[in-house]
Image (cartoon, rainbow, N blue to C red):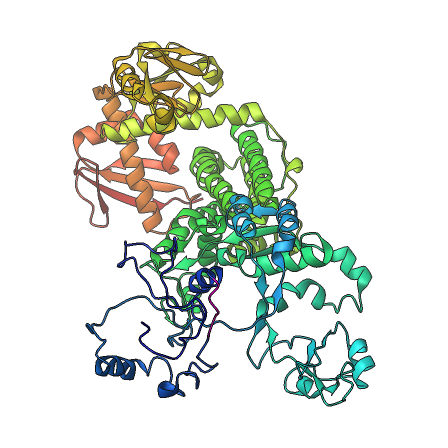
Amino acid sequence: RPLFPYFNGTPGAFRVLAGDFVTTDDGTGTVHMAPGFGEDDQRVCEAAGITTVVPVDHQGKFTSEVPPYAGTVVFDANTQIIRDLKDAGVLVRHDSYLHAYPHCWRTDTPLIYKAVSSWFVRVTALRERLLANNQLIDWTPEHIKDGAFGKWLEGARDWSISRNRFWGSPIPVWKSDDPAYPRVDVYGSLDELERDFGVRPTDLHRPAIDELTRPNPDDPTGKSTMRRVEDVLDCWFDSGSMPFAQVHYPFENQEWFEHHYPGDFIVEYISQTRGWFYTLHVLATALFDRPAFSSCMVHGVVLDDEGQKLSKRSRNYTDPLDAFDRIGSDAVRWFLVSSPILRGADQVVTEKGIVEVIRRVINPLWSAWYFFALYANAEGRRATPRTDSTNTLDRYILAKTRDMVTTVTDRLDAYDLFGACEAFERYVDGALNNWYIRRSRPRFWRGDADAFDTLATVLETVLRVAAPLLPMVAEAAYKDLTGVRSVHLTDWPDAGALPADHELVAGMDRVRDVCSAAHSLRKAAKLRARLPLPALTVATAGAERLTPFRELIADELNVKEVDLTDDVEQYASLVLQPLPGTFGARLGDATQQVIKAAKSGDWVLDGDRVTVAGHVLEPGEFELRLRAVSEDTTRALPGNDGVVVLDTTTTPELEAEGIARDVVRLVQDVRREVGLDVSDRIRLVLHTADDVRAAVDTHRDYVSSQLLAVELLHADDKMSDAHRRELPDGRAVHIGVTRAAS
């Protein structure tokens, strides 16, 4: 029997029903059903013919339907209800349990679910058109279209658009206050209100609009009145109406609206697939049968280092203005626009991550500009932007810059800021700084006009590309480089203004791959970069295409010879690596046979497929890797289509040359310390060990040219004003440097 007598007369109530949403995972499998206070409860009870009762008012207090608790907030009544159950002798046990409960996200006030009367938009009648119009929208990331947004549309239900609040846009519906004479009027304009009420309202909000009443035309007694319903519109209805409401369409600006609608682009975070994006889409489909926007970028949520969403209420974030002052706004900007957050993923924001942007992106870009300014000022040279240099490195960086501009432009046009930043960073840190500028440094020392003009051309273009991504850094460098008022007042660069050379770019990028692999071998062998080595062998298909770059490779890697060969098998063998996760379901028990046969080398490559243990693996179900015969001296190239082999043998002659190079580095360090310009000639005096002295003398021309030394002397004794430095083996070199007369 019911524990309380208040609703005993409700038809069909107080019986056991079945529901698939109840499990034994987090309880007994039995739950109390209150159709007026839960969505699932109402759905199951209504299906069973049980009437919904709601004995709680709009303030969360019990109504007179339950007299002992009438006027009491439901949470405050708990103690008295338990006491009454105990007094009635029906309380078996009284315990407290901790469980999740809804709270106001702003005030943390406990909330209850409560059934209320509402006005709805019949979205279910629009579902097919909503899905069709969604296919006309370009989403970034693309998976949102048929994923988060598409799935939400597939399950779209009728939209409750009314809210029982004071503030908000009043619902323009007037109803008769006498059920005996029902009438409902819906208004769509001020003209219609003026027609029926005889006045033209100037205040469309509560309470003024609620004072607008008139007699019910359908009531012959003349006693009932037409009154506005008390509800206001869901604020998301306002947001969804933005495109036309902002220009007072359709009452004004029809031509403007038709020209500007739908909008080109909107951006918001992922939850707006159920909020703003959704309401815009519903109203656009209902009113115009077309999307409200052409392109949409969806970003993720910004989190703190504990994975919690950043919020003003929690104050779990660093003040952005403080970060701008201490680290720089460009670093913060790049951190966010280059992060996965703009591909719909969540992003943890840390100061360490923002500072890392300075090292990875801002410093390399600024270093490129600073390098140019340093040498141009030292030479007193004003560069002339041009693209006609015949130097291989110049041609490469011009063509590589063209490719970068093309890629960044394409990515930005596709609203892929992540991809644009990725391409820009890879270019600046790799191709520009760590290859072109570093490899061209001697040319700048010599005052090579082609080098200066090419770098000026490249920097002018690169800084325009950087402008929307790093606006402050780009502005400062561009103004100094060009004297132009602002980079942000210039046009976006035209990639076609730079020469294309796909063959050269492919060849030079291959050279960079070769050098990167060889450098990793040298590092693993703990052989310093300034120590010359006998030879490098590059084994790959079409190795002869690297012939024009032989001298460049030798100089970059500090080796005496570069050998090129197509015979990869002499240095490495191809190994099959099955990917069972991609074919396990298809092959079942045979998967282990495939793995075993692959390890034993029992497989055959047939075009882009592999036959192993009698089974064919399709592309994507396996990887082919090169395994070096001698892993200490051999590295695979990217793509596993070749290897580099480094001869690490050393001789006394090579050691002596390495020592001379080490001395050059030490003297360069002293030059910087004493404030010499890069173009200053010097007089150099050294005091060091006999073998170091001999090495310097053997390579005197090299040392003098690298250091701009017009005189190089050796001192038998230590000099009082000398600068002490150490070679890699710890031995001291005492260095005296003075500026030579020009």
The main secondary structure of the magenta stretch is loop
Name the foreground residue: 464 vs 149: 149
Image location (x, y in percent) of residue 124:
61, 55
Visible in this render: residue 91?
yes
Image location (x, y in percent) of residue 34:
40, 69
Left or right: residue 444 compared with residue 580: right
Quarter of the image containing the C terminus?
top left
Q: Give the quadrant of residue 588.
A: top left
Residue positioned 66% across, 60% down in the render: 283
Residue positioned 28% across, 54% down in the render: 24
- Range shown magenta: 49-53
Image location (x, y in percent) of residue 443:
48, 34
Residue positioned 51% across, 37% down in the render: 447
Q: Report the number of numbered marks.
A: 0
Name the foreground residue: 706 vs 627: 627
Visible in this render: residue 379?
no
| Figure check: 565 above or below 198 | above
Quarter of the image containing the N terminus?
bottom left
448 part of magenta stretch: no
Q: Give the quadrant of residue 526.
A: top left
